[in-house]
Image (cartoon, rainbow, N blue to C red):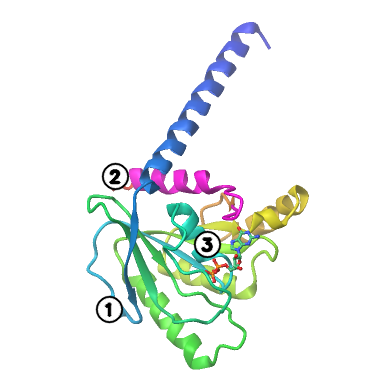
């Protein structure tokens, strides 16, 4: 390679690093505001009026969803964290205090609780699928999967719902701190394979740890990036 090519490569790398830093900063600014809980909707008729773009988070009970919402917003008690799975099934809406902020986070009720009776599972599906299918302001879902377990059959069912509702979604692995680098790389590859043919899945997977702060800047940047792309900010 000639010196000139080297120069161009360096320049391209510098531009890339700059763009990445700008995206990370946009993500930081998007979330660095006080957030508040707006309401919990136990059924579709309780949904708040459609407002700013909604970003929904879904995952099995205990996947670390509340911890991730708290970590993203930098607020310890925004979403409740607990070890008791199968709690109230509600769509919980969170917004920045600042009314002009271009985002609403929607915490979807956890699923996959082994002892859940059929009528509860049916109610979950009605609520979640009704929301996914009918909400024009919902622009992206994040499907949280425990890095220790990889995708389970009920995660795949939810991917099927998202594909059917044509809601674009991205997989986030949680609790990445519990795995070594090789095991984490293996579960990323396994998850990438599971979503490869899914029409609404975004191919890149983000590994996070709410406990160690891993991957949060990347996830915030990703969210800020598609909000900007959808003309929301
Ligand atoms: P949710 O049911 O999906 O809302 O899950 P929670 O956020 O309540 O978390 C379930 C359990 O996983 C709690 O005991 C958390 O402390 C734990 N947890 C959540 N995130 C992490 C993480 O990043 N690393 C580790 N090691 N544990 C986590």
Image quarter for residue 64?
A: bottom right
Q: Is residue 200 visible?
A: no
**Residue 12, image x, y percentages:** 53, 21
For mark 1, does the 10 Å Cα neighbourhood hold few (<14), some (14 to 19), or many (20 or more) residues? few
Residue with the mark numbered 3 = 67
Q: Residue at x 52, y 44 (%)?
A: 218
Write down which quadrant ligand 1 falls in.
bottom right
Badge 1 is on which residue?
46
Q: Secondary structure at mark 2?
A: loop
> Cβ–Cβ below 8 Å for labels 3 and 2?
no
Question: Considering only vertical position in the picture, is 117 above or below 35?
Answer: below
Residue 216 in sight: yes
Q: From the image, which quarter does the N terminus lie in?
A: top right
Of the image marks 3 and 2, the number of the one nearer the N terminus: 3
Q: What is the magenta range?
A: 208-229
Residues packed near mark 2 inside 10 Å, few (<14), some (14 to 19) or many (20 plus): some
Give residue 133's position: percent from left, percent from top.
36, 71
First reached walking from the N terminus: tag 3 or tag 1: 1
The vertical placement of 22 against 231, above or below, is above
Q: Disc 1, disc 2: CB below 8 Å?
A: no
Q: Which residue is mark 2?
A: 233
* Magenta stretch contains residue 209: yes
Is 67 on the left-hand or right-hand side of 103? right
**Type of secondary structure dominating the magenta stretch:** helix
Residue 192 in the image: state x and y as whole percent: 63, 55
Q: Is mark 3 within 8 Å of ligand 1?
A: yes
Q: Secondary structure at mark 1?
A: helix
Is 94 a magenta residue? no
Whichever of labels 1 and 2 marks the residue nearer the N terminus, that label is: 1
Q: Which mark is residue 69?
A: none
Q: Which label sits in the foreground, 3 or 2?
A: 3
Residue located 70% across and 63% down the image: 148
């Amino acid at each position: 390679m000639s010196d000139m090519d080297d120069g161009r490569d360096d320049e391209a790398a510098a531009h890339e690093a700059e763009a990445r830093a700008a995206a990370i900063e946009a993500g930081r600014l998007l979330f660095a505001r006080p957030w508040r809980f707006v309401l919990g909707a136990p059924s579709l008729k309780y949904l708040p009026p459609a407002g700013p773009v909604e970003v929904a988070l879904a995952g099995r009970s205990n996947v670390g969803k509340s911890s991730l919402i708290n970590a993203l917003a930098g607020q310890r008690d925004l979403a409740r964290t607990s070890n008791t799975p199968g709690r109230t099934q509600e769509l919980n809406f969170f917004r920045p205090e600042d009314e002009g902020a271009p985002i609403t986070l929607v915490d979807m009720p956890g699923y996959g609780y082994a002892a859940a009776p059929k009528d509860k599972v049916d109610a979950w599906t009605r609520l979640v699928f009704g929301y996914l299918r009918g909400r024009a302001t919902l622009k992206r879902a994040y499907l949280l999967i425990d890095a220790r377990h990889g995708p389970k059959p009920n995660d795949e069912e939810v991917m099927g719902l998202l594909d059917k509702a044509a809601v674009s979604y991205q997989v986030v692995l949680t609790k990445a701190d519990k795995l070594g680098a090789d095991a984490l790389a293996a579960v990323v590859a396994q998850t990438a394979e599971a979503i490869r043919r899914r029409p609404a899945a975004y191919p890149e997977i983000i590994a996070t740890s709410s406990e160690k702060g891993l991957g949060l800047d990347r996830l915030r940047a990703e969210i800020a990036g598609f909000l900007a792309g959808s003309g929301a900010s």
